[in-house]
Image: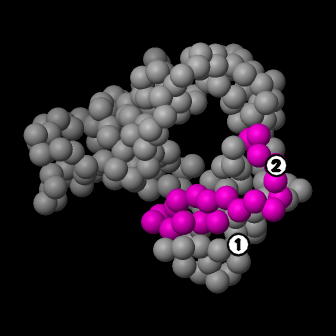
Amino acid sequence: MKELHGEIVFQPSFRNADYLRGLQDFDYIWLIWEFSANKHRANSPVVRPPVLGGNERMGVFATRSPYRPNALGLSVVKIDHIEWETAKGPIIHVLGGDLMDGTPIYDIKPYLVYADCYPDARCGFVDQRSWEKLKVIIPSSIASRFSPEQLQALKHSLELDPRPHYHHDSTKVYGLLFEGHDIHFKVEEGTLTVVYMLS
């Protein structure tokens, strides 16, 4: 989601601006990171992708499931700006990250259009399925606690239906961590309603 802001803060041994020399001339970067909050290692060669409704199985290497043999993630993010001099060394401010706070990042590589963009590429089972987005209702008492950008990012996160896709219980309350808040919601007949929030 392009509205999500993030910061890449380096370990002390990498807080040298020379590591980032020239990076300011790129729009996007690849991040190689760890699913550090996922304590469950892959114990099966197949997973159930959400885009298939959670009911069909695919090989783990044909999906982007977080349950992987090596627990590595790959994301492309937009560089918003680079803060060169801070108490924590250079900080890369990015947009569109899909990582949790505190996620370890192992490497950063520039996104290169000539090498990384193949607009006519086939995308397997993803090409054959449409993703039905949910209608999202957030009460004003909760919406007012977020900035317009945060609220838009929250709505985009929720409309993608963060539930396990084999769950269809309209009475069950689900949770999602967002910007330090515990968002609780229900889903019924294509509509997601936020019912309460814990801070």
Residue ID for mark 2: 168
x and y, in percent, of residue 167 in the image: 77, 46
Instruction: Determine the secondary structure under disc 1.
Output: strand
Residue ID for mark 1: 195
User: In this picture, is 44 found above or below 96?
Assistant: above
Q: Do residues under tags 2 and 1 come within 8 Å of each other at their CB atoms? A: no
Residue range corresponding to the magenta coloring:
165-184
User: In this picture, is 91 found above or below 115?
Assistant: below
Left or right: 44, with 158 as reference point: left
x and y, in percent, of residue 114 in the image: 47, 19
Residue 197 visible within the image: yes
Check residue 173 for magenta coloring. Answer: yes
Task: Say which residue appears at 60% left-offset and 66% top-offset.
Answer: 183
Left or right: 4, with 105 as reference point: right
Task: Say which residue appears at 71% left-offset and 62% top-offset.
Answer: 173
x and y, in percent, of residue 88 in the image: 16, 55
Three-letter code, disc 2? His
- In front here: 145 or 152? 145
Left or right: 70, with 25 as reference point: right
